[in-house]
């Protein structure tokens, strides 16, 4: 496992820190089992009481948490930041010995980089490109003409449809399906699905795409399990998409957008840079940059919170109207 | 790629058209990159301004859009119609050279049609039937006694459980799981899951079924990525089901139903013919034919819209009650 | 297929029964096709009229259904109970002949139990453990150091990441991904994902986990298709989780919790023992034991029902306020 200083971590996580940035962190752990040298997190108020007994060398904490614990990494979403940190500590541990398993199947005219690993029952079709040090786990399918970058890991049964491309250092977990609408009869000018560098996709993610409706995912974007991305979607760099979200066809996420679990982004809608969408929302109209939206349909979060508060005040409203009516009938 | 006249397309898409039906269409593309001879679409009001500069030979447009552009295909959901058109132009491009890869594994007593393609690591178990010109991509699993029609494409890692059946010309994208509850000890009278002809399933769709709770999907139905279909569901012909929908056990969709993204159809509920359900709804009671429903729980869409409008008027209600109370206390 | 008395079934299903417990049940079927000797169910009021003509030997019915039909198994959720019964009748039918297919790939230092079946293109990596009578279907991947119990069935393309463990008699349907965040450089003290005994996972379920964020699923838990389980979640014994649910990181479900379709359990939240969460809810705060919750955010179900009733009364409120205002202006 790698070792980072707190300052290095803060930069990689793109969050500010408080306290000694030179402290060395060599792993991550939950708050009740973390040990010296490890980074932990507190997201839920009910765990705040565990901070005093916490043995971690640093904590990821909400921006507004009042605590003397130092050093801290401050985050608007400590849990998401923790999962990003988890990935950082694992990345350099995933190297395995290279080579081509005799039970893999390779087409013609493939360009392989150095130190590629192709495990048993992986298949690479004609004219594909596989970059240096990339690993194909068992049962991976790379369609004809697809381009896979350097230091990429494709876990078991990932399927890359023909002509799609995957950027350097990306990690696709088991069962991801990339380009499931594509079927071009000839090499494309436009790749049906193009993933830039340093992207991570969770298990069983499905990203459709076609030459007429190309799908783009920008560098550094992290996507959780079972997310759906429709043909023509464009997702900016450094976005975070939590599990089971659906990004509609030709929808646009600008840079550093965060989408919580099970959100629907409707076809053709744009979510502005750095905006955050709350769990289970349906985004039906464009969202400006730097906004927090929530609801069905999604609206600015303070409006949605007020709306929910207003609904909860309804029973009292009925009482007040009844008493007004009674006074009116008495007078 | 095939070439269709606009009139042919309008019939295949089951939508009306305006203008010259004899014009030839040879492909599809988004509005800002479409060229002569191509079909495009406009769904979102923000793209209406692009129509004047659009080079497409025909457009799919909302039924109520006021535009001079001709010819037009009118659709209640231009984006869905576009994705259907996309499929039409790809279908005839997906033929590849036939044959049995030496690394495929075949059981006993299988009936193979003519010109079947079985790629590496595909497996066909005993007593299965595979129709003419059908293609099994790498890692496909066809369980014992399953019946696959003619001109079917099963993409990588599709799993067809024993005794299930797939109709002619159907396309199942990577990772579809058909019949995941089935396990009958003997050949069934009732197939656990039966897909009729001309069905398309997106990536990682899961359709459960069992001899006691058989699941049926009617011809021409298109189902998007990551949809869940529970055992016993019956889905009519020519339905459209958008991504991540859940169809409950023994639920019924009659013909030409459209279900938008992430909807739940509760177990045992019936959705009437040609009805449409809005994104993220939970359908808890039967829906009559030819209805538009939306909400949690789903209700007629004009009621749901009025309900949402009423909620947004709540803050004013509070003001009006307060002022009534003030006048009452003054008087 | 096995035969159970009604009393045995009632115990295995953990639901009470009324009538003759000695009656023998040898299968299950829907209410309109059930025959003598079979168990059926009625969940939806519209099917109550079919009870009089039903030929089943026993019915699963809602707790409050007024019917003379006997014997009955009473259940708060007859459909869920029916699907559990379906599983019971299938379990003993799934045995197939053992052996290692020559196209399977086995690593070094694996401990195999007796009568193990490893089908074509299944892969078991170094140091894994596979228990007696366990079946690996085609394309299954068992990572290094993983531990699979006895009488386990892993359907096609299941991927078990390194060091994860699966308990005895568990069934994982096609495309399940277990441990998709894990990558430990060395054998772990803490298994990234640990499934206890008698667990069933539907198709394409994704359960993440890592040594620092271990995920636990308790014995007897049944999980439907396409469910997402984040790293660090702890799920109690005997829970039922319907399709497309998302369990957030470090969330806790205590024993016998039931979660309906497409619910989100937010990271770090605890759902108390025996509680039930309605379809499409977002659980944002802890839920006490023995509670019924529903809504976005989830709240006690009677509050949510009242809230929805109040919203539907809003149009009348507007009328009443208007008439109060009119009387006020007149006076």
Image (cartoon, coloured by chain):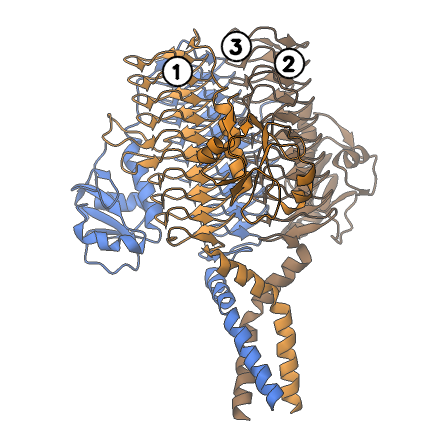
Chain colours: A blue, B brown, C orange
**On the rendered structure, is B191 left or right of A17?**
right
What is the distance, in whole Å, between disc 3 and disc 2 at their CAs? 14 Å
Residue pushed farthest bottom? B331
Tell which of C81 and C123 is nearer to you: C81
Callout 1: few (<14), some (14-19), or many (20+) C-alpha neighbours within 10 Å?
Answer: many
Q: In the rendered image, which residue does mark 3 sit on?
A: B104
Tell me, yes or no, whether dots 3 and 2 are on the same chain: yes
Callout 2: few (<14), some (14-19), or many (20+) C-alpha neighbours within 10 Å?
Answer: many
What is the distance, in whole Å, between disc 1 and disc 2 at their CAs? 31 Å
Residue C14, x across and y down, in percent: 44, 38
- SS under mark 1: loop
Residue B191, x across and y down, in percent: 64, 23
> Residue at left 59%, top 49%?
B281
Q: From the image, which quarter does the N terminus of chain B lie in?
A: top right
Q: In the rendered image, which residue does mark 2 sit on?
A: B130
Are the two marked residues, 3 and 2, in contact with CB atoms closer than 8 angstroms?
A: no
Q: Is residue B87 above or below residue A9?
A: above
Of all chains, the one bearing label 3 is B
Q: In the rendered image, which residue does mark 1 sit on?
A: C133
Of all chains, the one bearing label 1 is C
Residue B153, x across and y down, in percent: 62, 21
> Residue at left 55%, top 88%?
B328
């Amino acid at each position: 496992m790698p070792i980072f200083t707190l300052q290095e971590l803060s930069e990689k996580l793109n969050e500010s820190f408080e306290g000694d940035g030179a402290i060395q962190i060599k792993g991550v752990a939950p708050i009740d089992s973390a040990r010296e040298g490890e980074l932990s997190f507190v997201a839920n108020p009910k765990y705040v009481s565990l901070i005093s007994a916490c043995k971690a060398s640093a904590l990821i904490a909400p921006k507004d948490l009042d605590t003397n614990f130092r050093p801290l990494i401050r985050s608007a979403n400590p849990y998401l930041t923790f999962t990003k940190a988890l990935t950082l500590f694992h990345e350099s541990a995933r190297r395995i010995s290279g080579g081509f398993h005799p039970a893999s199947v390779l087409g013609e005219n493939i360009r392989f980089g150095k130190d590629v690993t192709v495990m048993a029952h992986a298949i690479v079709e004609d004219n594909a490109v596989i970059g240096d040090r990339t690993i194909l786990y068992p049962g991976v399918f790379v369609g004809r003409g697809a381009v896979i970058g350097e230091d990429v890991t494709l876990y078991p049964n990932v399927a890359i449809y023909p002509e799609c491309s995957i950027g350097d250092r990306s990690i696709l977990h088991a069962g991801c399906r990339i380009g499931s609408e594509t079927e071009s009869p000839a090499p494309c000018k436009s790749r049906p699905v193009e993933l830039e560098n340093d992207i991570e996709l969770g298990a069983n993610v499905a990203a459709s795409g076609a030459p007429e409706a190309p799908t783009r995912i920008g560098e550094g974007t992290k996507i959780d399990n079972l997310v759906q991305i429709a043909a023509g979607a464009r997702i900016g760099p450094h976005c975070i998409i939590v599990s089971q979200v659906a990004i509609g066809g030709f929808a646009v996420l600008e840079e550093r957008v965060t989408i919580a679990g099970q959100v629907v982004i409707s076809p053709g809608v744009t979510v502005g840079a750095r905006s955050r969408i709350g769990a289970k929302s349906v985004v039906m109209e464009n969202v400006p940059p730097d906004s927090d939206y929530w609801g069905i349909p999604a609206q600015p979060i303070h409006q949605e919170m007020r709306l929910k508060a207003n609904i909860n005040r309804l029973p009292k409203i009925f009482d007040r109207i009844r008493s007004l009516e009674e006074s009116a009938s008495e007078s």
